[in-house]
Amino acid sequence: MSTGVKKEDSGLNDFIKIKQYIIDVEGQTVAAIIDVEELKRLEQLIRDINEIIEDISSISAVEERKNEPEEDYKAYSDKRKSQLNVQLKY
């Protein structure tokens, strides 16, 4: 497969700073070249987005449980221990 290089402006280029596109003999874009700094920026952006998704997931879990009845930790702990039938040896 023969390839060539071309510079191209597109909507995506406004978001990702692409230096060059690799095209095949049919003129189809098959790859893009970006600077290492741009790659690092995109990797950080992905990490930031993942953190936001985790935050939204946590908020959603809290929202789903907000109407559950509250329970004292000691009472809950005692109930769990009795359900496990665990004898602690010291």
Image (tube, helix red, strand yellow):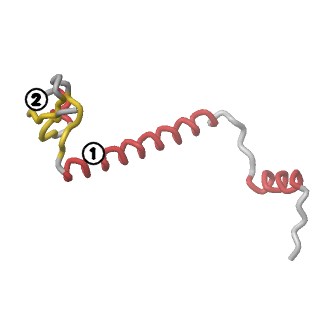
Quarter of the image for the C terminus: give it.
Answer: bottom right
Q: In which image quadrant can residue 8 be found?
A: top left
Q: Amino acid at mark 2?
A: Asp
Q: Is residue 78 left or right of residue 59?
A: right
Residue underneath mark 1: 42
Label 1 crowd (10 A; few <14 / some 14-19 / many >=20): some
At which x and y percent is residue 19?
A: 12, 41
Q: Secondary structure at mark 2?
A: loop
Looking at the rendered image, the disc whose residue lies closer to the viewer, 1 or 2, is 2
Residue 9's label in the rendered image is 2
**Residue placed at 91% from the left, 57% from the top?**
85
Q: Are marks 1 and 2 in contact (CB under 8 Å)?
A: no
**Residue placed at 66% from the left, 33% from the top?**
67
Q: Earlier in the sequence, mark 1 or mark 2?
A: 2
Q: Amino acid at mark 1?
A: Leu
Q: Is residue 5 left or right of residue 55?
A: left
At which x and y percent is residue 36?
A: 20, 52
